[in-house]
Image (cartoon, grey):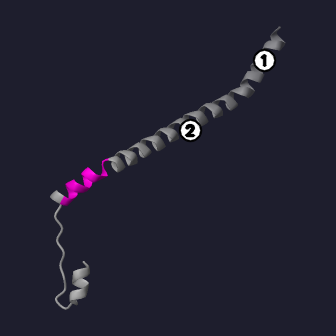
Amino acid sequence: MFITFIKVWKQKKRINPEVNKVRSNLISIFLINTVVLFTLSLIGFTYLHSTSIENYFKENVTSVSFLKMMQKSLKINNL
């Protein structure tokens, strides 16, 4: 009886590291999938509302450009 208990205990001890590896792999896969889905949702949200974001920047963000005095008028018109 005691010998069978020791055999079973040794078998469980051998299986246990494999179970821990599988568990840690599942946790890492879950975390990676969570981060990927969150990133994709942010990209999708930005894409869906890109026109409103574009209009906001067009109206509220000012840009200043400095031109050289010796530039040709063709280059200035292309800007």
Contact? badges 1 and 2 (CB < 8 Å)? no
> Which residue is located at x 83 percent, y 8 percent?
1
Above-or-below relation of 2 to 39: above
- Magenta highlight range: 49-58
Relative image position of residue 54 (x, y in whole percent): 26, 56
**Chief secondary structure of the magenta portion:** helix
User: Would residue 22 appear left or right of 69 to someone viewing this image?
Assistant: right
User: Would residue 6 appear left or right of 76 to someone viewing this image?
Assistant: right
Q: Amino acid at mark 1?
A: Val
Q: Quadrant of the C terminus?
A: bottom left
Q: Which residue is label 1 attached to? A: 8
The secondary structure type at the circle numbered 2 is helix
Q: Which residue is label 2 attached to? A: 29
Marked residue nearer the N-terminal end (1 or 2): 1
Whether residue 6 is in magenta: the answer is no
> Which residue is located at x 47 percent, y 38 percent?
34
Foreground residue among 14 and 31: 31
Estimate the spatial distance between the alpha carbons at disc 1 and disc 2, rounded to whole Å: 31 Å
Relative image position of residue 56 (x, y in whole percent): 20, 54
Foreground residue among 55 and 68: 55
Q: Few, some or many C-alpha atoms within 10 Å of disc 2 (few <14, some 14-19, many ≥20)?
A: few
Above-or-below relation of 72 to 38: below
Above-or-below relation of 60 to 37: below
The secondary structure type at the circle numbered 1 is helix
Q: Few, some or many C-alpha atoms within 10 Å of disc 1 (few <14, some 14-19, many ≥20)?
A: few
Foreground residue among 34 and 41: 41
Q: Amino acid at mark 2?
A: Ile
> Which residue is located at x 81 percent, y 10 percent?
2
